Amino acid sequence: VRTRVAIIGAGPAGLLLSHLLAADGIESIVIDARTREQIETTIRAGILEQGTVELLVDSGASDRVTAAGAKHEGIELRFEGEGHRIDFSDLVGRAVWLYPQHEVLTDLVAARLAGGQDLRLGVTAQRVEDAASARPRVIAADASGRPLVIEADFVVGADGSRSVARAAVTGSSTGGYFREYPFAWFGILCEAPPSADELIYSSSPDGFALISQRSDTVQRMYFQCDPDDDPGRYSEEQLWEELQKRVPGTTLRQGRIFQRDILRFRSFVAHRLLRGRVALIGDAAHTVPPTGAKGMNLAVADVLVLTRALRAPPAGRRRTPHRRLSRDGAAPHLKAQHFSWWMTSMLHTAPGASDFDHRRRVGELRSVVESRAGSTYLAEAYTGWPFASAG
Ligand code: DHB
């Protein structure tokens, strides 16, 4: 088959891109190996920057986000037994929304199908060929193994951290700069009322914990663990004990734990984002550790840059979307890379950290909460830098 834009991956990046392109009259095909149910039930983070929410609403991708989501105007940083509120409204006049990523996906899939767009699930991309030619191709296979070749003007790898498209851009499936971390998060979902009004990021002598939320009846919480920990090894009682000891000062409201998972931490930046007529966006282009919940927001920012690039009328052969993308695309996400690394490093206890390291981290946290300048940086980065204007 032929299309204007072939998009690999029906995550937030791929689906939103297809949605925005359709609004500009640019036809696309989105493929993903997963089923609709798998896409809509994968549990990921829950924080949307203000700019992400505005884009979802303004583009008609989701009208539920502001009704079903919850506006959060601050977070709490807790350390040495004391809580410190970072007041986003006061500091930067912006906010974030708690609206789980799988809800965003549900909205985007519905919008795609309602718009009659070509969304092919159960189709696995195998590789991208001829990236540097005028007609790059995606080689794929459907659920029964029948080959599918999609020829396009432009191919987008929105296929996550284990991207198949990456090899066509960087020369190898792993090509990029990365950093691993000696800890991970143990995440749970439980049936309980919220334990606090806002999210609590707590650094304790036993390690980090994040008390997040999903709704009035379902909560999401995480605690720092070993990356090789076995999620099955804890009883429910032990999980509550691990969580509770990391948030001294708050009595967690407990309830049945119905989902548990371990999230490994990685920072990654592909060393190229574009080759010829193939681009990488979202996690395929860059992965951040979860602290600060930047992942999906970064994917959305990429989509905006790419949509503008693909929309721009090519002014001569040398000014194809390529140049615009490589100029705009590289810089902004590095600030979010830094922020995610910084929040992670500031809040977690690294195995083998010395007493000096520990005291220095306390000094760092104090520099944030006791200084308007320090708090403002956190608030600005957490709520997100406004997406570059000029639509
Ligand atoms: C959530 C995840 C995060 O990484 C974060 O910083 C805040 C919230 C969440 O899943 O709710």
Image (cartoon, rainbow, N blue to C red):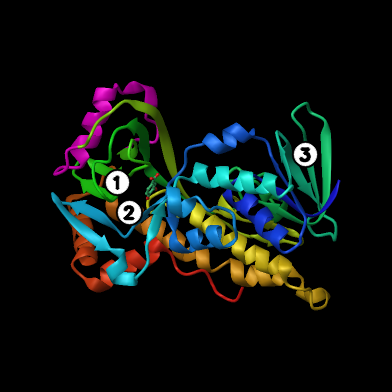
Q: Bounds of the magenta span?
A: 225-251
- Is 179 included in the stretch rendered in magenta? no
Sequence-first disc among 3 and 1: 3
Quadrant of image for the C terminus? bottom right
Tell me: 79 left or right of 61.
Answer: left
Q: Which percent across, then down, holds residue 74?
A: 29, 59
Mark 3 neighbour class, 10 Å CA radius: few under 14, some 14 to 19, many 20 or more: many
Disc 3 to disc 1, C-alpha distance: 42 Å
User: Foreground: 59 or 188?
Assistant: 59
The label number, if any, that marks residue 140 in the structure image: 3
The reply to whether the C-beta atoms of the residues labelled 1 and 2 are less than 8 Å apart is: yes
Q: Tell me: residue 131, above or below residue 311.
A: above
Tell me: 273 left or right of 375.
Answer: right
Identify the element where label 1 is drawn: loop
Sequence-first disc among 3 and 2: 3
- Is 227 included in the stretch rendered in magenta? yes
The label number, if any, that marks residue 345 in the structure image: 2
| Residue type highlighted by circle 3 | Ala
Disc 3 to disc 2, C-alpha distance: 40 Å
- Residue 289 visible in rendering: no
Q: Which percent across, then down, holds residue 58?
A: 56, 63
Sequence-first disc among 1 and 2: 2
